[in-house]
Amino acid sequence: MSLLIRDATAADVSAITALYADEVRERVATYEYDAPNEQEMARRMRDIQGAGYPYVVAELDGAFAGYAYASSYRGRIGYRWTVEDTVYLRPEFHGRGIGKALLAKLIDLCEAQGFRQMVAVIGEPGNGASVALHERLGFRTVGIFQGLGRKHGRWLDTVQMQRPLGSGDRDAPAGEDC
């Protein structure tokens, strides 16, 4: 088994779009209702990468297995040291450690960039695999929003998890004066 985690490129957009469309249609990891097309997914990738956030893909034996990226947690300046992670795997690749490898790479890249906190927003507590993945990499549950979203005809709770990056909130970032 040869696992490769690498930066996402425009050549990955088709596979990313297909995986995300399946998530939109079939599951509740995202609360989006309409699957975006390739042009929209390419724009989203460019925006995330253009803002300086990491966006990576996993290949297992040369086959696209999934992707992950970090993005801004919130738009206000005071949140600039906090990122939100996103990880998606093709269902046939679940349980092989690929999600862990993607998230670990994302954590390493975000720490190297000086981010101090990573937040996971997990669509419903019943997504035990995602909760367990995040726990294995040092996240802790900080809250559950009840009935925060609605999809597939039901109200969904949302798990909020958090993990410090680097020294977390123990000291101020270099050059920070606020």
Image: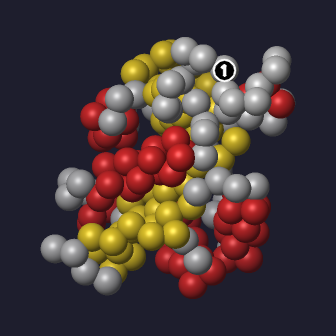
Q: Residue at x 83, y 30 (%)?
A: 76
Colour style of the rendered protein structure: secondary structure
Question: Residue 111, can we see it?
Answer: yes
Q: Quadrant of the N terminus?
A: bottom left
Observer-nearest of 169 and 3: 169
Q: Residue at x 41, y 53 (%)?
A: 105
Lateral position of residue 90 relative to residue 56, left or right: left
Q: Quadrant of residue 8?
A: bottom right
Q: Amino acid at mark 1?
A: Ala
Lateral position of residue 110 relative to residue 46, left or right: left
Q: Above or below — where is 10 with respect to 41?
A: below
Q: Quadrant of residue 117?
A: top right
Q: Residue at x 28, y 34 (%)?
A: 136
Q: Position of residue 78 (x, y in %)?
A: 79, 25
Q: Position of residue 63 (x, y in %)?
A: 33, 80
Question: Residue 152, can we see it?
Answer: no
Please tell me how crowded label 1 is: few (under 14), some (14-19), or many (20+) other residues with Cα within 10 Å: few
Observer-nearest of 54 and 150: 54
Number of numbered discs: 1
Lateral position of residue 144 relative to residue 125, left or right: right
Residue pointed to by mark 1: 172
Q: Quadrant of the C terminus?
A: top right
Q: Above or below — where is 64 with respect to 147?
A: below
Q: Secondary structure at mark 1?
A: loop
Q: Above or below — where is 157 with respect to 49?
A: above
Observer-nearest of 80 and 177: 177
Q: Position of residue 140 (x, y in %)?
A: 40, 21
